[in-house]
Image (tube, rainbow, N blue to C red):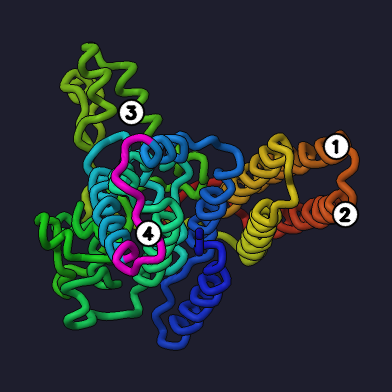
Amino acid sequence: MDLVVYAVPFFILAMVLELLWGLRVGRNTYRVNDAVSSLFLGTLSQARKFVTLGVGGYVYHLTSEHFSLSLMSSKSIWTWVLATVLYDLCYYWLHRLGHERAILWAAHVAHHQSEDYNLSTALRQTSTGFLLGWVFYIPMFALGVPAEVVVTVGSINLIYQFWVHTEHVGKLGWYEWVFVTPSNHRVHHAQNERYLDRNYGGLFILWDRLFGTFQEELESDPPIYGIKGPLRSFNPLRALTHIYAELFSDSWNAQRWRDKLHVWVARTGWRPADLEASDPRAKPRLADFVRFDPPTNLSVRVYALFQLVIVVALLGYLQAGVVTSYLASACLVLAMLLTTITTAFWIEGRAPLINMRWDLLRLGIFALGLVMTPGLGVFAAVTAAYLIINVLFVLVVFWFSSEAGTDGSINAA
């Protein structure tokens, strides 16, 4: 059973409590732009499941049916214990290679782009991990672990990882030696040199201690969050594709065929020698790092939160199982993607007139789809109301942004 959907109310409540606690103690770790960006990516990662066909499930089925040991009993406590430990071991290697190999880093990088560290960061997930990530869990099916056990322990593992994304919990004594904690996971999200590529475990930190990838958080070296070569954008499409684009560019431009292929499976950061010589990429110094935080007015921040609610509502509509047509599901996911992209334009502080044009174009596409799709009933009425409210909202945000003198520059505050 996938328990993640049932944990969503807890996630929301926990984020609200973390925000309130941070405000109370004078250490707020949330910014609207960064948090909305993270939550947009989280909703898109869940929506992706309604429009992509996973090869992994079919491979798992073939493995269980034809290439596995005898099926374990899901009623045995030892099956669950073994599955919990084995799943985290598989996750460790997926996570580790997700940092060490270029094609896997391209999928995983979205989770590390946030330059804040709070519970919303936990929900900042990729939408492309399904392409290869499933390969690492084949051993569980080969050993005869029932599919329902794999899914359940996997969701428990993911839910556990949520709470470790906070700056408000210090070190936890002996617990640090066995389990992943906020302290040792803060290390994992830091771009400090000593912290890079460390602490990969999902539930157990024992794997890192065993395989030599553990690093303790040090008071003398506070974590600085984000990725080397910062994205400097809140656009989810760019967040999900920028490493793929770099790899494709290097593969296309490399002179040797061996390099064209090796680019995809090489150690993260490797480039062909001819490209390094002709088109070197600057390696930013950590000392020069400044968080991407373009100035926005209150109307933009409220608008971003409004669109977040809409995107989450669309995801809930999909998950409720009301939509049975693949085409309709694909259209709703596209609507979510377009909404997140145009909202990103606003919170990036771009020119208000250009933002308004893109947003009105998005709404025009929605309206056209509404007119051309008969029989939507209540959904049509709700969508029409949303379009009217959204048009008025866009005009208000445009007016306030123009009055504030936003010039379209993208500079960190």
Residue 76 painted magenta: yes
How far is disc 3 from disc 4 in space, using C-alphas? 44 Å
Asked if one can make out residue 202 in the rendered structure from this viewpoint, the answer is yes
Residue at position x 35%, y 30% in the image: 246
**Counting residues from the N terminus, which is met first, the one under dot 2 or under dot 3?**
3
The span shown in magenta is 66-80
> Mark 2 Cα within 10 Å, few/some/many (few <14, many 20+)?
few
Q: Main secondary structure of the magenta part?
A: loop
- Residue picked out by circle 2: 378
Which amino acid type corresponds to the residue marked 4 in the rendered image? Ser
Type of amino acid under label 1? Thr
Q: Are marks 3 and 4 in contact (CB under 8 Å)?
A: no
Q: CA distance from mark 2 to mark 3?
A: 45 Å
Q: Label 1, on which residue? A: 373
Mark 2 residue type:
Val
Expressed as whole percent of the image width and height from the top left, the position of residue 287 reads 21, 56
> Which is more foreground, mark 4 or mark 1?
4
